[in-house]
Amino acid sequence: MLAFLKIAWRDLWRHKLRSGLTMCVIMFGAGITLFYYAFTTGAFLGELEYLLKIFPGYLQVHRAGYQMDQTIARAMPLDPRLTAALDRMPGVTAYSPRLCTGTFVQSGGYLANATICGVLPDHEVKTSRVAQTFFPDMIKLPRGTKTNRGYSGKYLSASEPKSVVIGEVLARNLQVKVGDELSLTTQDAYGSMAAINFKISGIFHSCSDKYDSSMMLVNLGALQDFLGMSGQVTQIAIIVKDLNDIPAVEKALYGAIAEGRGPWTVDSLGRGLWMVRPNKPTLPEDSPLQLANQEILDKMLSRIPGLKDFSMEVRTDLALNGATVATLGVDPAREMTVNDAWPKAASGLTGADWVLLDSSIAEKSRLKTGDLVMLTGANYAGEPVKLELKLAGVVAPGGKARAYVPLAVLQDRLWLGENVSQVTIKLPGSSESEARSLIGSRLNYEVVLWRELRSNYMNTTKTSSYSMSFIGAILFVIIGFVFMLTILMSVLERVRQFGIMKAIGTRPSEIFVIILLESAMLGLLGTALGLMLGLIPSLYLIYNPINFYAISEEAGRMMEAQDMPSFIYAKLTARMLLKATLINFCLVLVTTIPPALRASRTKLAQTLRLQ
Amino acid sequence: MGFMKKFWAGGSCLIALTLALAFPVFGQMLTADEVVAKMDALLRGETSYMKVKMTMYNPDWSGPRELEMFAYETVKDSRSFIRITEPARERGTGFLKIGYNLWMYMPAAEKVMKIPPSMMRDSWMGSDFSNDDLMHESSIVRDYEHKIINLADHQQGGKVYQVELLPKPNAPVVWGKILVWVWDQGFIPLKEQNFEESGKMVDEMIFSEVREMGGRKLPSKWEMRSMTKPGHKTELLITEVKFDIDINSGIFTEKNLKSKNW
């Protein structure tokens, strides 16, 4: 082996120019790869930070279901235990409790749609750039760059409860200025129309078209009073120090709110199975109106880690020949995953006319499979309901229910809409208290991460990151081809050498290894030098960001208007160096294989005879 | 087709009355058109004044909510006016409708607001009626094809017509189908069900407590139940009605909407 290394090393030095050229190509490849990563990652992270810090935050806490149905009916009380936990949570740099709702805002004859958020002024100003617009010193700008941000008037203060700050575009649309009065009309906690007047204390130009044209901030207490929602908020926006802190913060938040007892009854059925039922305090516990929306419940359950299966059910009492039968409306495909008593034969049940009966009931009523079963009951308004279903099979007595019918049929006939009265959950592998806190926390609260908060943005970045990956792939293919051609040329120049080596007894595999070793040496050296080359522009961009305002005033403004920073930094991490090294080195080795194979197959007689 | 729509539908009442006068009915069997026209005529006058108590039920609330109001309407020029009188939180809130325009007045802000199209689907004062229900210009007489699909006996004598209403092509309506049950003793509506175009029932209104009011026999309790939101219900109790009265045209003005004297 050492001999091969020696031969390879000498080969390189025998043709200094050729080896130097090859190494230059490799060096360039490594440099470009590193810079590509540093630039695209830096641009992405910068854009993300800018976007999330404008207003939404890196993550938000809501009452469960708010993300899907953003109405004040899904507000939550601001739990002091949660704010206390946030105050000392590592990784969290700021948070802001908000009560937000859509509103119509009117001034004179002008009318506009807007979003109004009640905020705690001190918390908000640490959390969102919208509020920070009033304090230019709070927003650090890279040296040499500028911004189009600006404001007039002053920020909210707790001492003026009837003051509002609004976006500059909104103010222009309404033809108002600082000191003017605005009328807001919106639906209050009861869905009734309510109106109030606020005085404009400040107008912000955050540069974001979205927020400048639709956002209004008022004192939290003032909005709570107006809507009749004392102590309630719809969201808590949270800023973390680093994206990598998010999973830990998410976990800690769920932990902090796990004890929160919400309007649910959670019962253990044993063997990792749990029964969850809504238990709204405004209704008796056994009311048929104790219901949960199927779609929103589905979303809540999807946030429970380790959840394996679940089945949504509607519970009611029906009567068969005068005897009461506890009945569940179920979806067979789901129910069989959480119900051991579910008969195997009934796994593929579809359609809307089947019923499964307790075998003892079927026997007593002398019903056979395929017989028509008449069940009667009542909807929540007390009106009689009659179901005519075909007996599809029997279940062993002593299970969850004595009769099972299609979920959709029961929902339709009992006027329940898209709601269910209970859900059975399979959550194996957790202790009872763990499972209880996992379920309880996700039924009452949701911690929504930025990917979901800004799903629109995520979709655009997904396409742009696809196109960036595509560009990256093209780049690598080009680099690979250049490597291969260079190495191929260097092999073709040396056919005579390989012929002689073969003539003195070198095996083809040995020639193959020698060429691979040559490439490996060049690759290592070239990559090392290349990384240094790549560091130069990367480091430069870390300290001197690309400034769109320097390109043109127009370009800078356009970036800011679309919630993007007007400057791009590069970002370097040890991981990137490693990634660039690996990719480049592997590329060199892989592209060496075809030329090396060719060299190893050198035909001795032909190459030597020609001379 | 909500309650407000009934009060405020366009000039259909005139057409209905003309129809009823022009084709006097002989014999027992009525056509579907006649049944609907007579029912529609019963619930409306040329002009009307009424006092209504609205009770709203929502399983998420700790109890029902009540609103009291009075309303003026003139059918001919499609103008109406509503003022909420109770409770204190909503007192003084007013609505004015002239033709296709709807204005709202909120005493807390002392501002008149024209309700924009984007708010039309919103609930009216938290009830199961929408602003659109108030505004809608469609008429069950004019915009639908009528068909009697069942005739049954009523417990208290007389017959109950079950009429199916399907929208005429290009009619400006929201529903795909309406079913009404009409009692031929005075052509009092008993029940009405509204269906989406997909055939799904959206809500149901039950009429009950027939009483002599304003010189007519009318159902005084109207109960609207949502089929999509279980437990949501809005009840209207008509406490006073006057038909065919003289209404000062000053009532249907923005000045009156903002007035505190009422």
Image (cartoon, rainbow, N blue to C red):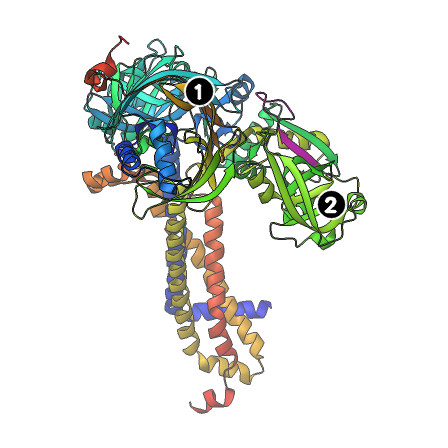
Question: Are both tags, 1 and 2, on one chain?
Answer: no
**Is there CB contact under 8 Å for labels 1 and 2?**
no
User: Which quarter of the figure has residue A227?
Assistant: top left
Residue A333 placed where, x, y %? 64, 49
Identify the mark at residue A219; answer none if there is no mark. none
Magenta span contains residue A83 = no
Q: Which residues are magenta?
A: A274-286
User: Which quarter of the figure has residue B8?
Assistant: top left
Magenta span main SS: loop
Please tell me whether residue A202 is drawn above or below residue A24 in the rendered image: above
Quarter that holds the C terminus of chain B: top left
Q: Amino acid at mark 2?
A: Leu
Please tell me whether residue A205 is drawn above or below residue A542 in the rendered image: above
Q: Chain of mark 1?
A: B
Q: Is residue A289 left or right of residue A18?
A: right
Residue B138 placed where, x, y %? 31, 37
Residue at point 48% right, 78% down? A598
Circle 1 or circle 2, nearest the eye: 1
Nearest the camera: A46 or A5? A46
> How far apart are the alpha carbons under marks 1 and 2?
48 Å
Q: Is residue A557 visible?
A: yes
Q: Please give the residue where the numbered disc 2 appears in the rendered image.
A: A357
User: Which quarter of the figure has residue B11?
Assistant: top left
Q: Is residue B10 left or right of residue A409?
A: left
Please tell me whether residue B258 is drawn above or below residue A18 in the rendered image: above
Q: Please give the residue where the numbered disc 1 appears in the rendered image.
A: B211
